[in-house]
Amino acid sequence: MKLPDKTLNIPDAIAAIPDGATVLVGGFGVPGTPFTLLNELARQGQRDLVLVKNDANEAGMGIDHLIGNGQVRKLIVTHLGLNANAIAAMNSGALEVEFCAQGILAERIRAGGAGLGAILTDIGIDTELANGKQLVEMNGSAMLVEPALRADVALIHAAIADPFGNLGYAATARNFNPLMAMAATRVIVEAEALVPLGGLAPEAVETTGAFVDHVVELTEISQEYGIVRR
């Protein structure tokens, strides 16, 4: 059986994202963030987006471009501390923000990828993180019900890919990317290097191409990627 070639140009890949989409965005600060895909999304201008990301990047890079354009309705995030623009948008009411403990965010995404409806945890009980969420009793202890997270689209950064979408990541740039690739209906990957099918050793594949819909090769690494230059 011949595996399909999923390579696509960046504009066409991003054009598949509709207004109102929920989008998982990989990355932890700079490492693993798909800056080129985000810049194209900012250029195309899709509106009313819900973004799920570990952080809001810094001012002038990454998802800050989308926030500044008014493209983001809601952000589900662990912190905003490095982005004064995102904090100002939240405080003014222009941006709805849902905060989530970092480990819980990762587990909610993992649960979404595994087909679960929610996870139970005692983390966040009696704090603002529990506001509006259901509490249940489990083995005599109170547990907070954290709904699983799935999305319409995931935007992923990989160090290396083949045309089918098998992916490898560079060290800590792996972070949220493998989980997010499992938890979205459409997965769009930007790769620093594209190798022929078979060019990735089986043990080097950290996300299988079964989860990937589109692969775009980066022709240049901009200054935003500075930390991952090798």
Image (cartoon, rainbow, N blue to C red):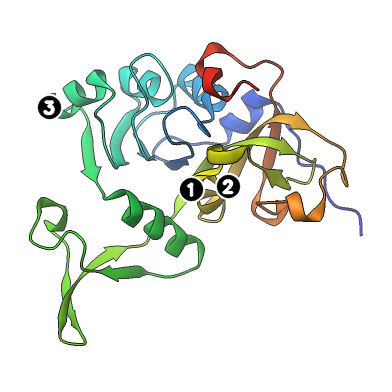
Provide residue 122's location: percent of width, then percent of height: 20, 68
Viewed as shown, does residue 206 lie left or right of 77? right
Under mark 1, the amino acid is Asp
CA–CA distance in space, label 3 to label 1: 27 Å
The residue located at (63%, 41%) in the rendering is: 169
Mark 3: secondary structure: helix
Residue in the foreground of this view, choosing between 67 and 26: 26
Which residue sits furthest left?
126
Viewed as shown, does residue 25 lie left or right of 87? right
- State whether residue 90 is above or below residue 68: below
Q: Earlier in the sequence, mark 3 or mark 1?
A: 3
Provide residue 112's location: percent of width, then percent of height: 44, 61
Mark 1: secondary structure: strand
Under mark 2, the amino acid is Arg
**Residue 213 seen:** yes
Label 2 packing within 10 angstroms: few (<14), some (14-19), many (20+): many
Label 3 packing within 10 angstroms: few (<14), some (14-19), many (20+): few
Q: Which residue is mark 3?
A: 91
Q: Which residue is mark 1?
A: 152
**Quadrant location of the C terminus in the rendered image:** top right
CA–CA distance in space, label 1 to label 2: 6 Å
Given contact means CB atoms under 8 Å apart, are the residues at marks 1 and 2 in contact?
yes
Viewed as shown, does residue 57 lie left or right of 211? left
CA–CA distance in space, label 3 to label 2: 32 Å
Viewed as shown, does residue 139 lie left or right of 70? left
Given contact means CB atoms under 8 Å apart, are the residues at marks 3 and 1 in contact?
no
Q: Earlier in the sequence, mark 1 or mark 2?
A: 1
The residue located at (82%, 50%) in the rendering is: 201
Mark 2: secondary structure: strand
Q: Which residue is mark 2?
A: 186
